[in-house]
Image: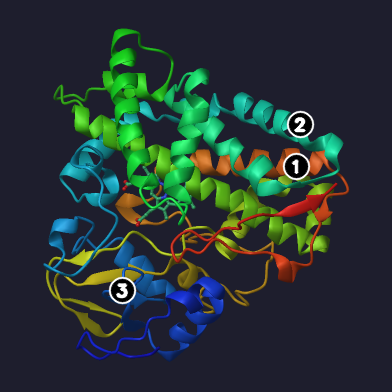
Amino acid sequence: MTTTASDSTDLDDPTSEIMADPYGVYARLREAGPVHRIAGPDGRPAWIVTRYEDVRRALADPRLSLDKRRALPGGYQGFALPPALDANLLNMDPPDHTRIRRLVTRAFTAGRIERLRGPVRRTAVALLDEIAPHGRADLVAAYAAPLPIAVICELLGVPARDRPDFRDWTDALVAPDPARPGRAKEAVGSMLRFFGRLLTHKRAEPGDDLLSALIAVRDEGDDRLSEDELMSLAFLILFAGYENTVQLIGNAALALLSHPEQLATLRAEPSRIPAAVEELARYDGPALLAIRRFPVEDVLIGGATVPAGETVLLSLAAADRDPHRFPEPDRLDLDRDTAGHLALGHGIHYCLGAPLARLETEIALAVLLERFPSLALDVPLSDLRRRPSTRARGLLALPVRY
Ligand code: HEM
């Protein structure tokens, strides 16, 4: 577990332990040393960084590249996307990243997100109205998952008739079915064709949606987004925006249900929900790891020299539970000062959708508490199962009664 050996054989592989108990494993790693060489989730050697100060510094270090082409040959083996979807912000460094992020920021404005407030609330209310008569439900399937997908469709301007297909493809990517091995690849193909058609349609008939705005956006130099960049962005916004938000709503609901006294304070004072979302994201955020990074030169991290081209994993979960930064980090404390938490990243790749993620989670929790005053877990805590992922921490199901 605590190896810092430089050869790539006999590396500890904490993958299954991390899936079972990420905070316990990360606490042990963090105490044993700031940086460890382990077998990463792809089975290849990787360096994992666990302390808050090191993770925060590394997130903003321009010597750590997100561009896969910076990986050593034969090193990192990640999920391979077709080139038309690979021109995305999370696979890019400046100056390309700067250029695209600047263009997107012009279209993805605070006003556009604020305009989603009404639709998010209406969707949340409608979803709960639907399950209300049953008295019990799986909150992930009935609420945490359909809400963000509806919001992303609204944001991107996906027509209502296409939304069921859209959701099937997204689910095939986010939660691959081991019984259908080719399904994720098929879903990428379907999505690629779908976005191609949608872009053609939005070009001919622009709407009041983000995709139309991204097509139209230009900067002072008359620069604009290419077809591949538009496709990659639509895909990234869907992917990054859907999966993480589902898991944050589910994890947050569970954290509150398992801390009844803190749940009661929020019910009494719903105006505290926005601050609570920050602590809930710190306490059990979905993004356990940042996107893998590759040093462009040998870089000293936490006292270890990480050679150029090797894979660096920055553990956001370990950093946000570092007792040197957040006292008693394993305690959910809605009154805590959470400033500087890393659940949404830090630096130039800081989550582009952070205002939307916050808005959705706040409304999801507010509507849930309003609508179901007697909400409670419907199974013992020990029966709950997590998704088998070292990257996106979430629940397979959250059975509740109300
Ligand atoms: C609770 C929900 C969310 C969480 C926890 C989350 C987390 C993150 C994190 C940690 C990063 C930085 C990754 C890194 O530096 O390695 C990131 C980036 C990003 N997120 Fe989010 N995210 C959430 C929701 C969203 C939403 C709703 C959208 C869009 C609608 C979105 C779009 C993006 C994009 C486009 C990036 C890449 C930004 C860049 O590279 O410049 N995210 N997110």
Query: Where on the picture, by quarter, is residue 5?
Result: bottom left
Mark carried by residue 122: none
Give the x, y percent position of residue 241. Answer: 46, 42
Earlier-in-chain disc, 2 versus 3: 3
Kindly identify the amino acid type of the residue bearing the numbered disc 1.
Leu
Kindly identify the amino acid type of the residue bearing the numbered disc 2.
Glu
User: Would residue 220 appear left or right of 367 to someone viewing this image?
Assistant: left
SS for dot 1: helix
The yes-or-no answer for disc 3 within 8 Å of ligand 1 is no
Kindly identify the amino acid type of the residue bearing the numbered disc 3.
Gly
Q: Which residue appears at 37% of the width and 66% of the height?
A: 56
Earlier-in-chain disc, 1 versus 3: 3
196 to 331, vertically: above or below: above
Mark carried by residue 368: 1
Q: Which residue appears at 70% of the width and 53% of the height?
A: 253
Instruction: Give whichever of 141, 262 is nearer the camera.
Output: 141
Q: Which residue appears at 35% of the width and 19% of the height?
A: 212
Residue that numbered label 2 is attached to:
130
User: Would residue 142 appear left or right of 196 to someone viewing this image?
Assistant: right
Give the x, y percent position of residue 78. Answer: 27, 60
Label 3 environment density (alpha carbons within 10 Å; few <14, some 14–19, many ≥20): some
**2 vs 1, front mark:** 2
SS for dot 2: helix
The yes-or-no answer for disc 2 within 8 Å of ligand 1 is no
The residue lying furthest to the top in this view is: 205
Earlier-in-chain disc, 2 versus 1: 2
Residue that numbered label 3 is attached to:
43
Label 1 environment density (alpha carbons within 10 Å; few <14, some 14–19, many ≥20): some
Res 345 seen here: yes
Instruction: Give whichever of 143, 233 is nearer the camera.
Output: 143
167 to 42, vertically: above or below: above
Whole-angstrom CA distance, mark 1 to mark 3, is 40 Å
